[in-house]
Amino acid sequence: MIVLEFKAMKQWQELLDKTWKDAEVFATLVQQLPESKFEDSFSNEKYGNYYTNIHGIIEHTHYHLGQIVFMKKLVRKQKQ
């Protein structure tokens, strides 16, 4: 059981590290966009502009972070 928990914790930490790294890369790329690009159509006009899509990515990430927090609370409560 301890080995499985260690493996799970290692995988969890690797996921956290990758998530933070990806977030930093994303933020850097957004910072490098010229202001005028935010108004341009994304890959196809039906998907809106860059601003709407970047905002959507951030909002979607927050949604999943909320799910993770909720699940962590449930797991901690079950361990008590």
Image (spheres, helix red, strand yellow):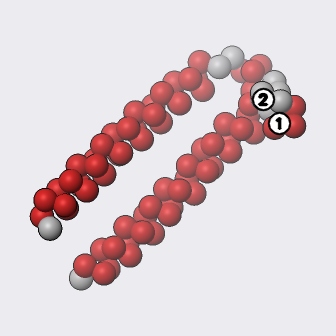
* Residue at (42% x, 69% y) in the render: 71
* Residue at (19% x, 61% y) in the render: 4
Q: Quadrant of the C terminus?
A: bottom left
Callout 2: helix, strand or loop?
loop
* Residue at (78% x, 29% y) in the render: 42
Q: Position of residue 10 (x, y in %)?
A: 23, 49
Q: Amino acid at mark 1?
A: Gly
Q: Is residue 79 above or below residue 57?
A: below
Q: Nearer the viewer, residue 48 or 7?
A: 7
Q: Is residue 39 above or below residue 80?
A: above
Q: Quadrant of the N terminus?
A: bottom left
Residue 78 in view: yes
Q: Position of residue 60 (x, y in %)?
A: 61, 50
Q: Amino acid at mark 2?
A: Phe
Image marks 2 and 1: residues in contact by CB distance under 8 Å: yes
Image quadrant of residue 37? top right
**Is 80 on the left-hand or right-hand side of 15?**
left
* Residue at (25% x, 56% y) in the render: 8
Callout 1: helix, strand or loop?
loop
**Residue 42 image label:** 2
Residue 39 in view: no
Image quadrant of residue 14? top left
Residue ID for mark 1: 48
C-alpha separation, residue under disc 2 versus residue under disc 1: 6 Å
Q: Position of residue 76 (x, y in %)?
A: 30, 74
Q: Nearer the viewer, residue 19 or 35?
A: 19
